[in-house]
Amino acid sequence: MAETPVIDVRNVIKDFPSEAGVFRALHGVSMRVMQGELLSIVGPSGSGKSTLMNIIGCLDSLTEGQYLFDGRDISAFEEAELAHLRNGSLGFVFQQFNLLPRLSARQNVGLPLVYSGRSRAERDAKAEELLGLVGLAGKERSRPMQLSGGQQQRVAIARALANDPRLLLADEPTGALDTKTGREVLDMVRRLNRERGVTAIIVTHDPGVAASTDRVVRIHDGRITYDGPPTAEALAGAGRQVAADETPA
Ligand code: ADP
Ligand code: MG
């Protein structure tokens, strides 16, 4: 039997209604992501990258089409089941880190474990392990303000990994960092992918970031226009066209 994709998005349409009428942000997007993949989503500002990520992350609903997570159609899920899926199976990383300023690095990383009912000792132990994994051993007690941007993003990545998610979703994770720091953060995600098998989807503007992932999905005006290896052409935005009804493996 063929392996079940972690993500299976089928002909997804997303409309945003407004007073001026309906704005269609996604026009029938299909993509599959298998366990262990490291892929980037690229495309101009306003092309629908975050809209797609929000649907994949179960943060927003789709208008038409289908979304299977681990083979399960999530359109049938109640809000509580979606919250459980988000907290237990998905790890989120955002451009602005979104750390709680009054909490230490260790407390920030342990926060998702509060929601999954783990004890203080378990949370601290897991947070320390993860901070070590992202190269921040010794910074457990630091508050976000006492850390550099790159270090804060590492804390955010450690937090995203707290519940051993099936999937790490990062929307412009290097967008608030200088190029060098951004590359370091990305190298870390790559290492997590290679060494721990973390499946990751990264939205990025940076062709250098996209080039270091294994697969690039390009979106333009709400349609996937390329899905394949990070060739120079693809990164320049001139890749092979993918038909709307083609579901790339
Ligand atoms: P990207 O992340 O690629 O920059 P987005 O997915 O954020 O793009 O947005 C895609 C398009 O959908 C944009 O034209 C944006 O203005 C529109 N859009 C996104 N979210 C909303 C919303 N909540 N309401 C109305 N329009 C939205
Ligand atoms: Mg965006």
Image (cartoon, helix red, strand yellow):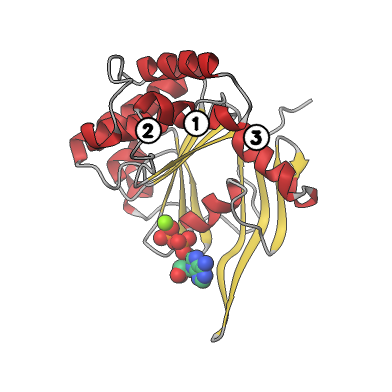
Neighbor class of circle 3 (other Cα within 10 Å; few <14, some 14-19, many 20+) is many
Tag 2 secondary structure: loop
Q: Amino acid at mark 3?
A: Val
Q: Is residue 52 left or right of residue 204?
A: right
Q: Determine contact: label 3, label 2, CB under 8 Å.
A: no
Task: Using the image, determine if residue 9 lies above or below residue 195.
Answer: below
- In the rendered image, residue 142, in percent from the top left (x then y), is placed at 28, 26
Q: Is residue 225 visible?
A: yes
Cα separation between marks 3 and 2: 33 Å
Disc number for residue 6:
3
- In the rendered image, residue 131, in percent from the top left (x then y), is placed at 37, 19
Q: Is residue 199 left or right of residue 32?
A: left
Question: Looking at the image, is mark 2 or mark 1 nearer the viewer?
Answer: 2
Cα separation between marks 1 and 3: 25 Å
Disc number for residue 126:
none
Query: Front-most of 50 and 240?
Result: 50
Q: Amino acid at mark 2?
A: Leu
| Chain-order first, disc 2 or disc 1 | 2
Q: Determine contact: label 1, label 3, CB under 8 Å.
A: no
* Disc 1 target residue: 111
| Chain-order first, disc 3 or disc 2 | 3
Taking the spot 63% from the left edge, 31% from the top edge, the residue there is 88
Residue 210 position by quadrant? top left
- In the rendered image, residue 73, in percent from the top left (x then y), is placed at 77, 45
Taking the spot 77% from the left edge, 49% from the top edge, the residue there is 78
Q: Amino acid at mark 1?
A: Leu
- In the rendered image, residue 3, in percent from the top left (x then y), is placed at 71, 27
Query: Front-most of 92 and 13?
Result: 92
Q: Is mark 3 within 8 Å of ligand 1?
A: no
* Disc 2 target residue: 103
